[in-house]
Image (cartoon, rainbow, N blue to C red):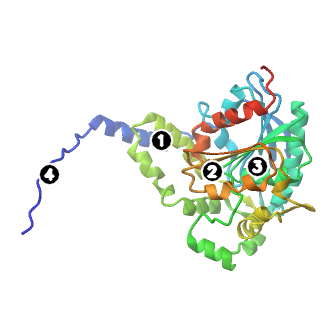
Amino acid sequence: MATEAPFKGSIPEFDYQKEMDRWANVVKLLSEPEPTVGQTPRTEVWRKNKSVLWHYPAKQKKYEIPLFFVYSLFNKPYILDIDPKKSVIKNLTDMGYEVYLLDWGTPGYEDKKIGIDTYVEKYLKTAVKRAIRHSEAEEITLVGYCLGGTIASIYASVAEEPIKNLIVATVPIDFSTFVGPEKWAEGLKNGDINLDHFLDVYGVVPSKYVEMMFRAIGSPIYFTNYTMLLNRAHDHRYVEKWRRMNKWTLDQVPFAGEAYKQFGNELVKGNKLVKGEFMVGNKPADLKNIRANLFVVSGSRDNLVLEEQSKPIMDLVSSEDKTYVCVESGHVGLALSGLFAGIVDQWAASRSNPLFK
């Protein structure tokens, strides 16, 4: 006959005040306005269609070579300036860098024919020229985050502009490793998943579809955000961080139809960037043409872009000065925590022509 062993543990004491604070914070969170983001002072330098080039002046300029940020087409770039205390952009301007950011904007149906190649040739190329002219610098540093790093790498491989440094973080380069449900991988490989006809009708991938895609890739982690909030709602610092992250996560942007076709068919399915077959105008985006100093940053806890997708760029470029690091961070946490600014500074400081030695 089975017998139950006596319970030797202790039941934790119920903290009434902690529970009251926790639920009060949840009620407050659901009723108050969204947090303010993007507070670092900036000025508009150039605009084309929906895209805007922003300049963030250095608090006290210490380097000749400015930083030019290229962010993903999937999300809004204010993740780089989401919290005044941990803003990537603010921290870098405080460190003495002139910073530029190309905000791609929100494409509509009328932008359905804009491809990644067009973004590179007609938008990024011109924006870099404007930044160089505006800064009166002789060279520039490109900083690409996530798919922005992919686009920055494509541009760097065909650019005639003076790019001294190329920094890419959480960047997908080699798409032979697929991140997402196995059925998606099979569908893409077999041609069962094809959004071309859908995009011909709708023109763009709607923002809600983009959000659903990231939910599917990030599950079950993605669905724990509200659970984590309930568990830690008594922690005011955590709640403030959660509010900013939740705002950004739900604030997706549509993806221009032609750009998504190229992303899905040529980069993901065809892996043409690794093969040197992706075309920008009449030029192949061959990464071996990149000779700029290269810095690649991956996150050990990144579940969206794995090391295996980023690291191959190290062998594909012709750069003599190239560095690879993997830091203890997730895909978004690298920017959200403010960690990225310090990592960039540690590498870029000696490669940005310091004004004071």
Local crowd size for mark 3, using a 10 Å CA cut-off: few (<14), some (14–19), many (≥20)? some
User: x%, y% of residue 327?
Assistant: 58, 44
Instruction: State the mark number for residue 251.
Output: 2
- Image quarter (top left, top right, bottom left or bottom right) of the C terminus: top right
Depicted 283 relative to depicted 356: above or below: below
Secondary structure of the residue carrying numbered label 3: loop
> In terms of sequence position, does the residue under pointer 4 or pointer 3 come before the other?
4
Circle nearer the viewer, 4 or 3? 4
Q: Residue at x 59, y 59 (%)?
A: 214
Q: Do we see residue 239 in this rendering?
A: yes
> According to the image, label 3 marks what residue?
105
Badge 2 amino acid: Asp
State the residue position of label 4: 7
Mark 1 vs mark 2, foreground winner is 2
CA gap, disc 1 and disc 2: 17 Å
Residue at x 56% of width, y 48% of height: 330
Q: Judge left or right: residue 101 versus residue 230.
A: right
Mark 1: amino acid: Leu
Q: CA distance from mark 2 to mark 4?
A: 48 Å
Disc 1: which residue: 29
Name which quarter of the figure residue 163 lies in.
top right
Label 1, label 4: how far apart the Cα atoms are: 39 Å
Secondary structure found at label 4 = loop
